[in-house]
Amino acid sequence: MSSPDASALVIGECTARGLTIAVAESLTGGLLVAELIRTPGASAVVVGGVVAYNTAIKQSILGVDAGLLAREGAVDPDVACQMARGVRERLAIDGRVADIGIATTGVAGPDPQDGKPVGTVFIGIATAAGTSSVALHLSGSRDDIRSAVVSESLVELTRLLQRNLKI
């Protein structure tokens, strides 16, 4: 698992800036939101998470385009972006969407999925300023890959916050 310092940094910075985070996870199965909420004070930042492990849930709950899923499968940068946008919107509180949506989708193994090799992962991040994805090509055991995705997700959140863009 990632260092608690990474979670604390993200939670601290979001708290200071009054930002909220919503999380959508596939291959990480709740590990990312669990890591974030290990930090005291996370309840002021983390609005919630959706584990969309089954591909159909990505479409029905998070609003990922069914045509995209049929064409590309669940392991795709655009799917990660749509998951991140969808979780921001769907976990709105009192009409306020989350400031940051982050999503993980990929192949932890042991077998390839949708023609993508084990270790292929996409992290999607969405804010009011836009949406982007990060591609990862990881190796190791299933647990190693899932843990690395959590760590890399926290790195990406930290980078986003350090860029100090209008979120």
Image: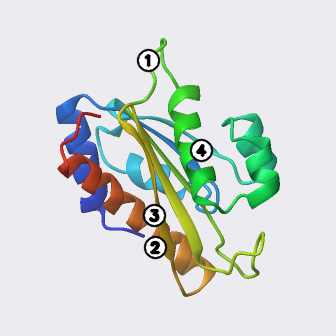
Q: Is residue 73 visible?
A: no
N-terminal of the two: label 4 or label 3?
4
Q: Is residue 143 left or right of residue 166?
A: right
Tell me the residue that label 2 is attached to. 148
Quadrant location of the C terminus?
Answer: top left
Tell me the residue that label 3 is attached to. 150
N-terminal of the two: label 1 or label 4?
4
* Marks 3, 1: nearer the viewer: 1
Q: Give the Cα distance between marks 3 and 2.
A: 5 Å
Give the residue at x 68% y 81%: 117
- State whether residue 78 is above or below residue 20: below
x, y percent for residue 87: 56, 36
Contact check, label 3 and label 1, Cβ < 8 Å: no
Q: Residues within 10 Å of mark 1 (few under 14, many from 20)?
A: few
Give the residue at x 74% y 60%: 72
* Marks 4, 3: nearer the viewer: 4
- State whether residue 159 is above or below residue 161: below
Secondary structure under the numbered disc 4 in the rendered image: helix
Q: Give the Cα distance between marks 3 and 1.
A: 26 Å
